[in-house]
Image (cartoon, rainbow, N blue to C red):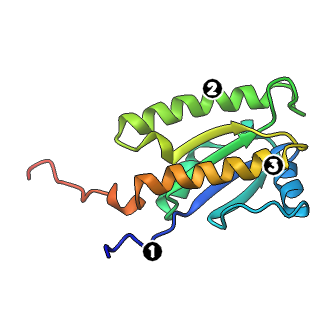
C-alpha cells in the first residue's frame, strides 16, 4: 500500500450567496449526498473574489479550488459572474502555465434550484482533484540563482 492510498483532497469552494450557496443549501436540506472534502466559503458575488484568495487557499493547504456563481444572465449584481469568468480564466491559464494541473482550479455555474447538480459537481471536482494527487507533490524547493 502506498503513502497516498488514504489521502483525500481538501477543496475550497467559493460560492456566491444568491445562487451557488443556495444550491448547496438545497442539496443539504434535500439530503443529497456528496463528498465531505469541500470547505465552503460564501461570498456576496463570484465577481468580487480576489484572485489572491485562491492563491492563499493553495498556500494554506488546499488541493483544489472551485469558484461557482450564478448562471449568465441571472446574476443579482447584473454582470458579476461574467467578470468572474474573465478573471478566473486568466488566473487559471497563468496557474497552468506555472505548472499547476488545470483540474485543481475549476469554475462553474449553479443556480439556487440545482441542488442535485451542485452535489454532482462537488463529486466531479473531488474526483478530478483526487486524480492529480496531493498538492504537496507540486511544491518544489526554491533554488537560488547561483545554484
Q: Is residue 11 left or right of residue 17?
A: left
For the residues labelled 2 and 3, the Cα–Cα distance comes to: 26 Å
Residue 20, given in percent of the width and then of the height, sits at 80, 45
Q: In the rendered view of the protein, which quadrant contains the N terminus?
A: bottom left
Q: Is residue 120 left or right of residue 132?
A: right
Residue drawn at point x = 63 percent, y = 38 percent:
107
Residue 140, given in percent of the width and then of the height, sits at 27, 56
Ranked by sequence position, the earlier of labels 2 and 1 is 1
Residue 120, given in percent of the width and then of the height, sits at 71, 49
Question: Are dots 3 and 1 in contact, CB under 8 Å?
Answer: no
Question: Which residue is situated farthest in the left direction here?
Answer: 147
Question: Are dots 2 and 3 in contact, CB under 8 Å?
Answer: no
Ranked by sequence position, the earlier of labels 2 and 3 is 2
Residue 59, given in percent of the width and then of the height, sits at 47, 59
Q: Nearer the viewer, mark 2 or mark 3?
A: 3
Q: Is residue 43 left or right of residue 65?
A: right
Q: Secondary structure at mark 2?
A: helix
Q: Secondary structure at mark 3?
A: helix
Count neighbours of disc 1 (C-alpha within 10 A) and say few if under 14, some if 14 to 19, many if 20 or more: few
- Identify the disc placed on residue 116: 3
Establish if 63 lies above or below 3: above
Ranked by sequence position, the earlier of labels 3 and 1 is 1
Q: Is residue 104 left or right of residue 79?
A: left
99 or 132, which lies in front? Answer: 132
- Identify the disc placed on residue 6: 1
Establish if 35 lies above or below 51: below
Q: Nearer the viewer, mark 2 or mark 1?
A: 1
Using the rendered image of the protein, determine whether residue 56 is visible from the camera's viewpoint.
no
For the residues labelled 2 and 1, the Cα–Cα distance comes to: 36 Å
- Identify the disc placed on residue 86: 2
Amino acid at each position: 500500500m502506498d503513502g497516498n492510498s488514504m489521502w483525500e483532497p481538501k477543496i475550497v469552494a467559493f460560492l456566491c450567496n444568491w445562487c451557488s450557496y443556495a444550491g448547496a443549501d438545497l442539496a443539504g436540506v434535500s439530503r443529497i449526498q456528496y463528498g465531505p472534502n469541500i470547505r465552503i466559503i460564501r461570498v456576496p458575488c463570484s465577481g468580487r473574489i480576489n484572485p489572491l484568495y485562491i492563491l492563499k487557499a493553495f498556500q494554506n493547504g488546499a488541493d483544489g479550488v472551485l469558484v461557482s456563481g450564478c448562471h449568465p444572465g441571472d446574476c443579482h449584481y447584473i454582470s458579476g459572474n461574467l467578470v468572474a469568468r474573465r478573471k478566473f480564466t486568466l488566473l487559471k491559464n497563468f496557474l497552468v502555465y506555472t505548472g499547476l494541473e488545470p483540474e485543481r482550479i475549476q469554475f462553474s455555474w449553479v443556480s439556487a434550484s440545482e441542488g442535485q447538480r451542485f452535489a454532482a459537481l462537488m463529486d466531479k471536482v473531488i474526483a478530478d482533484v483526487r486524480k492529480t494527487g496531493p498538492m504537496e507533490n507540486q511544491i518544489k524547493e526554491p533554488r537560488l540563482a547561483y545554484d
